[in-house]
Image (cartoon, grey):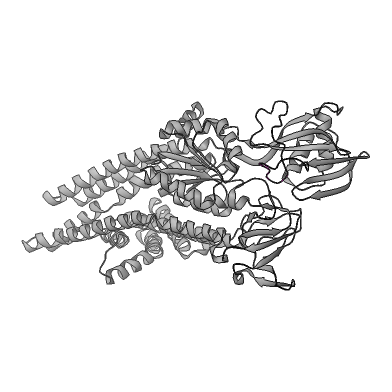
Amino acid sequence: MSATLAPQTTPVRSLTPPRRRTRVLALPEARWALAALVAFLLGLALDLGGAPVWAYGIPYAVAYVTGGWEPALEGLRALREKTLDVDLLMIVAALGAAGIGQVLDGALLIVIFATSGALEALATARTADSVRGLLDLAPATATRVRADGTEETVPTADLAVGDVLLIRPGERIGADGTVLDGTSEADQATITGEPLPVVKRPGDEVFAGTLNGTGSLRVRVDRDPADSVIARIVTLVEEASRTKAPTQLFIEKIEQRYAVGVVAATLAVFAVPLAFGENLTEALLRAMTFMIVASPCAVVLATMPPLLSAIANAGRHGVLVKSAVAMERLGEVDATALDKTGTLTEGTPEVTAARPLPGSGLDEDRLLALAAAAEHPSEHPLARAVVAAARARDLPIATAQEFTATPGEGVTATVDGRRITVGRPKDAVHTEDPGRGSLPGDRGPGSGDPRGATVVTVTRDGVPVGTLALTDRLRPDAAATTAELTALTGTAPVLLTGDNAHTAARVAEATGLTDVRAELLPEDKVKAVRALQESGRKVLFVGDGVNDAPALAAAHSGIAMGRAGSDLALETADAVIVRDELATVPAVVRLSRAARRLVVQNLVIAGTFITVLVVWDLAGHLPLPLGVAGHEGSTVLVGLNGLRLLRESAWRSGSAQAGRG
């Protein structure tokens, strides 16, 4: 990857890692699962079509082999380590079903488990790709200044604390450090979430992987590259992902105990009657019947159809939930934390007020047109916002001559023979300037309190003629969403942002939030999320940037905004809002809760059937056809019950309540 980019041509979010996604069919698990599914569907079609046994038996056998060889191999390896997992039990149950003529049941069980394994492998590979891609944000090389003033190009991995780097316009910064000399702007949205470039002067901190603007900087390296903020983000994501392992270990223990119990019980059901003189065939038939009715097919289907139906329903409405586990966890949340830039706001500035000064002879439209003409050649986000505002009013934009841009100050150009400057006046106090300067205390018509706004001045031939106020636009459904999340969880969401306190306060006031935590680095967001969870809450975090990825991973559940979201945020999150419709957040939480209720219903149904059939088989004589009918009947029943969430009304119920929020 190139270490430099052409100056003034890189958009704000250009630091998003390149997409290096693992292709689905590149995974062996996915190829075997697909082969098993195709073979199963072919066999099912031939079976239902009345084909002879050998005709549909061959595809079923292929499904058994392609979908079952890997879990069978893993199960045998586990046996060598004196453990028994549920995958091996499923293989034994499938073979047992085939042994007594229920080939279809066994093949279906094989396909379910093969597909589940493939999805898990794909999710793991995608996340690993994205974490590795994050490291591409930092350049491979940097320009180091020697003690004698000469320059050398060195790998960033060889940089040491105290080294001095030369950062040219358009280059990515190679290490975390402090500006020694120069003035420029840095796009650090990937680190802090700030939507606009931040002016950097001597004494200011800069971060590895962020993009330098049009000025030249000399930076002293303050952290080893392995300890940079970007590197710590990677570490935080990996650590937070590992914190979910204890739950997985608990599930594996339950699975192992269940598998051992069923195998032991099956052997006992076969051996005990045989020892008391029962016919070998009868004892074997009773044991195989027990294996069938005790197999967890109904339990598997009790859980998956409601969750998969909810996933499909959410997908139709622009919410991609990545797995059944993710869908289930969404319904457990009882607290929410929200990012600001790109989540509650759209992440792009807009002109909210234009104020001509008395005596300038300008009205709002003429002031805006004049500023747009001067800003038109610039690629700065504020410049694009000014030009967009003028075009929205259909104002004529004159051609600018002699255009110049000064980092941290603004632009100057000749428009219709007059020298026009847009930016920070030299005598203004620098307060909350995110890169272009502000005028403290300025108020434009209709702008209200200017706190949190970027206010620039427009001068003509050196004389101020007006001011423009620009803010990051709030999403139209932000206030309703925060209100609904408050109703869902019983507590108002917490606002976590890397942006400045004034801007955060403005957004919080507009959305009804009271707990606001601003100027946070990624690790600070993680600490805030973990603090909430240590107090006993299950936190849903909603964000969009690379800087949000650690918090997305640390939270009980994470949702990423899809359109502007970074690759790492999209891969780390449990769900993605494809169309950035914030109101779908409470709707999908409600849908998840409905799915969890159906899961409980199905588990009760499946457990009741298994218990009754097992007791019948042990205490009496359960005919094999009746055992299969009861087992398959419970499977069909819980499957149909779970499919209820495919209905449009299931989503409308959640979104309607969200709308009333």
Residue 518: x, y in percent? 55, 43
Position in image of residue 522 (x %, y %): 53, 51
Residue at horizontal 76 percent and vertical 58 percent from the top: 6
Q: Nearer the viewer, residue 230 or 5?
A: 230
Nearest the viewer among 286 and 365 is 365
292 to the left or right of 171: left
Can residue 431 be found in the magenta stretch? Answer: yes
Residue 444 found in image quarter: top right
**Looking at the magenta stretch, what is its main secondary structure?**
loop
The residue segment tinted magenta is 430-436
Q: Nearer the viewer, residue 48 or 312?
A: 312
Q: Position of residue 609 (x, y in %)?
A: 23, 44
Residue 458 visible in the shown view: yes
Q: Position of residue 48 (x, y in %)?
A: 39, 50
Residue 155 shown in magenta: no
Horizontal side, residue 298 vs residue 498: left or right = left
Quadrant of the snapshot with the N terminus: bottom right
